[in-house]
Image (spheres, rainbow, N blue to C red):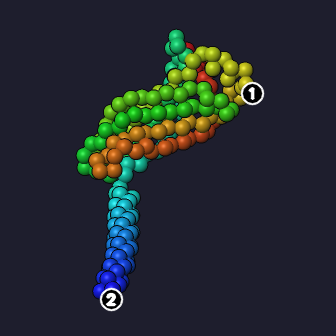
Amino acid sequence: MGTGEEEETQKSGDATTADEGGQDQEAREEEEGGLMAGLVGKAREFVSEKIAQIPKPEAALERVSFKSISSEGVTLHSHVDVSNPYSYRIPICELTYTFKSDGKVIASGTMPDPGWIGASGLTKLELPVNVPYDFVMSLMKDLSGDWDIDYVLDVGITIDLPVIGTFTIPLTTQGEMKLPTFRDLF
């Protein structure tokens, strides 16, 4: 009888040891998982810091001015100056714009694939903004005697850089544009 009790005690002792070992293994796996997550987090921070320090192209937007009148409407234009810190050309994926006056969107559009930013220098892009006649007429009704329009032009230049990927440079300019008179047109 004594032998059976000893075996039973020994078996239950082994079960306790196995349970504790299982808990230890779970704790180790959790600790390793936490360690791995910490390493991945640190690697992400390091890469983010390095990418943030990479020089990126910069851009400036000139004021909007009158360009021409056609059968479709009035064409306004602005120049976008883009500087490239790299010694190679960079493709511009697209140029998007929104032209607003008095809180209303007058014109918006996208220029797909407008070209390249030249290597190590400044590239001037012309941004034509086509305003349909119905908007021109509604603007003229809102004009005061000075023939000025207050405007806001929002532009996004989407560029594809190696390593960094595709990103957009947001630009905004606002000002006052004088509408042409009949003497200016003819």
Task: Say which label, 2 or 1, has the lower sequence index.
Answer: 2
Q: Amino acid at mark 1?
A: Ser
Image coords of residue 39 (percent x, y): 34, 68
In the displayed orientation, state which residue is furthest to the bottom.
Answer: 2
Q: Which residue is at a point 27% across and 42% down the rendered structure image?
A: 89
Write down the quadrant of residue 42 in the picture. bottom left
Compared across the picture, whether 177 is left or right of 37 comes to right
Compared across the picture, whether 51 is left or right of 146 comes to left
Quadrant assignment for the N terminus: bottom left
Q: Residues within 10 Å of mark 2 (few under 14, many from 20)?
A: few
Question: Residue under circle 2?
Answer: 2
Write down the quadrant of residue 157 in the picture. top left
Q: Secondary structure at mark 1?
A: loop
In the displayed orientation, state which residue is furthest to the top.
Answer: 71
Question: Residue under circle 1?
Answer: 144
Image coords of residue 25 (percent x, y): 33, 73
